[in-house]
Image (cartoon, rainbow, N blue to C red):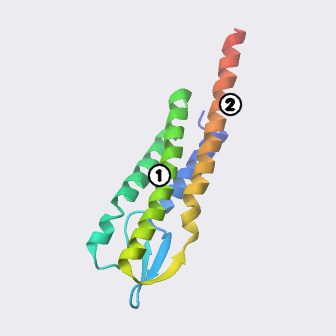
Amino acid sequence: MIQRIQTIYLIISAAICAVLFSHPFASFNINNPDSIITATVCHTIPNAGLNAKLVPLAAISTSLLLLTVIAIFMFRNRTKQMLVTRINIVLCIAQLALMIGSFSALKSSLNSDFNGLDLWLAAPVIMIVLQYLAYRGIKKDDDLVKSADRLR
């Protein structure tokens, strides 16, 4: 059912993933303007080749958001919902690795002052925890239904 606690976990996870498209997870100081890196683009950097390094991160983030929204509405098929949630956990780990990798690649190619990592770098870790909690809730519901079927 859509009002279960795992749906709340999935909605929060999807909201965090959507926020990553607009909020930076790292910032650099190139000459005067600050350059920020979001999940899809590196703002205020004149070299378009640097934005090409963020294409895998944008693809992972987009697919993670779409799969999370799909998992929310798969409440009638718990086995597929558990599968999609496990895939989302793997995608969250890949997203975190790509965020760190793209940050280090841009840091080495820019040769500029590093302002720092933002709090949004921890978003994939929070999403992993939320996806895991949703998986546990789905599994608990599935086990409850299976035990009720045995009693009949």
Q: CA distance from mark 2 to mark 1?
A: 27 Å
Quick one: which residue is furthest to the top in this view?
A: 152
Quick one: which residue is furthest to the left in this view?
A: 48
Please provide percent x and percent y for residue 93. 52, 51
Please provide percent x and percent y for residue 61. 43, 54
Please provide percent x and percent y for residue 152. 69, 8
Which residue corresponds to mark 1?
A: 94
Which residue corresponds to mark 2?
A: 140
Q: Residue at x 32, y 68 (%)?
A: 51
Q: Residue at x 49, y 40 (%)?
A: 87
Quick one: which residue is furthest to the front in this view?
A: 108
**Which quadrant would residue 37 be assigned to in this image?**
bottom left
The amino acid beneath tag 1 is: Ala
Tag 1 or tag 2, which sits nearer the N-term?
Answer: 1
Query: Is any atom of residue 108 visible in this view?
Result: yes
Please, what secondary structure does the residue beneath circle 2 have? Answer: helix
Give the answer, above or below, for where 89 lies relative to 96.
Answer: above
Depth check: give the residue in front, 117 or 135.
Answer: 117
Please, what secondary structure does the residue beneath circle 1 have? Answer: helix
Quick one: which residue is furthest to the bottom in this view?
A: 32
